[in-house]
Amino acid sequence: MKRVYNFSAGPAMLPEEVLKQAAEEMLDYRGSGMSVMEMSHRSKVYESILEKAKADLRKLLNMPEDYEILFLQGGAHTQFAMIPLNLMKNQEADYIVTGQWAKRAAAEAKKYGKVNIVADSSDKTFSYIPDCTDLPISERADYVYICENNTIYGTKFHSLPNTKGKILVSDVSSCFLSEPMDVTRYGIIYGGVQKNIGPAGVTLVIIRKDLIPEKVADFVPTMLQYKIHAENNSLYNTPPAYGIYICGLVFEWILRQGGLTEMQRRNQDKARLLYDFLDQSKLFYGTVRKEDRSLMNVPFVTGDPELDALFIKEATAFGLLNLKGHRSVGGMRASIYNAMPLAGVEELVRFMTDFERKYAK
């Protein structure tokens, strides 16, 4: 069976090696006589899977011991509430709004305290990252929040904002493990794993241990308290056990490839190939300011909605799937996460070249 090139923004393609290993271990995980999907999350076998995943992630990120790794559920949307519920001691936080997900996060946080929008790129349909070198950070702000890579709009913070000493909280759902990062610059890093790490259903949270509050307001649900999950090693309730196992296989795969430096090199090569084509194309053009372009999500258009629709239709028939842009912006979007091989982007560029030859006026 021929596998297609899947450019979905999430759930996204996984490394083929990982899928093959998971298939081999589906009925019998390493002599246990069980699938990971059916074993107890409290068993010694599963405990070893969880601990290995955490250790490999720590190694990938060169993560200090004063950061806690949590495997949770509920997606990034649950974190929109969990973060202010746990971190808003002064009932105030600063948000940088560079897309729909940061906008939703800010709206959710307003339920629990004062939210200051200290930078906003909505004036140009979130097609750029605002200057964040000298923001009006509130003295009372408990943290500064960003969405580091904007999946819908294809923008990326290539320099972190100057938070003037305040804790930085970052949603890294669509750029996590795509390049090296200095964990110590953040208070919380989090994201849904379904874009670059694993299957939908797992939310990964990395939090500095001193930020985990001993006590939160009485109305905060038990399941929305970082302390509960940290004290129970992400096993307070039944975790998304199989999804965590797949994440662990992906961590192993990245380490085998050469780690995050190698992931960054590959991702830069793929992105450069596609952006270089867009910059010289007579039919297609990118929608993001050049200096703010994402390595992971590349939106582009022809300027003609009917031609965009035809492109998506013909690309799908050719085996280049899920190139339709987000419903809020239209056009096209190629998500080229770690698991997308260079050959997939080369095939896309060849197809775009042929399409341009047929339809450019």
Image: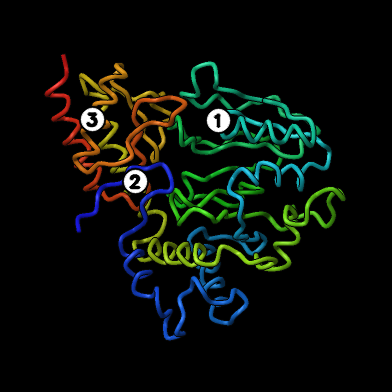
**Residue 98 appears in which quarter of the rendering?**
top right
Which residue appears at 60% of the width and 42% of the height? 170
- The quadrant the N terminus occupies is bottom left
Pick the residue in front: 154 or 244: 244
Which residue appears at 48% of the width and 49% of the height? 176
Question: Quick check: 225 above or below 353?
Answer: below
Q: How is the image coloured?
A: rainbow
Which residue appears at 57% of the width and 60% of the height? 63
Question: Quick check: 127 above or below 214?
Answer: above
Pick the residue in front: 196 or 176: 196
Q: Which mark is residue 306?
A: none
Q: At which x and y percent is residue 167?
A: 70, 43
Dot 1 and dot 3 residues touching (CB under 8 Å): no
Label 1, label 3: how many angstroms apart (C-alpha)? 28 Å
- Mark 2 surroundings: few (<14), some (14-19) or many (≥20) residues within 10 A: many
Q: At which x and y percent is residue 208?
A: 68, 55
Q: Secondary structure at mark 2?
A: helix
The residue under label 1 is which amino acid type? Gln
Label 1 or label 2, whichever lies nearer to me, is 1
Which residue does the numbered mark 1 point to in the structure image? 100
Q: Secondary structure at mark 1?
A: helix
Q: Which mark is residue 277?
A: 3
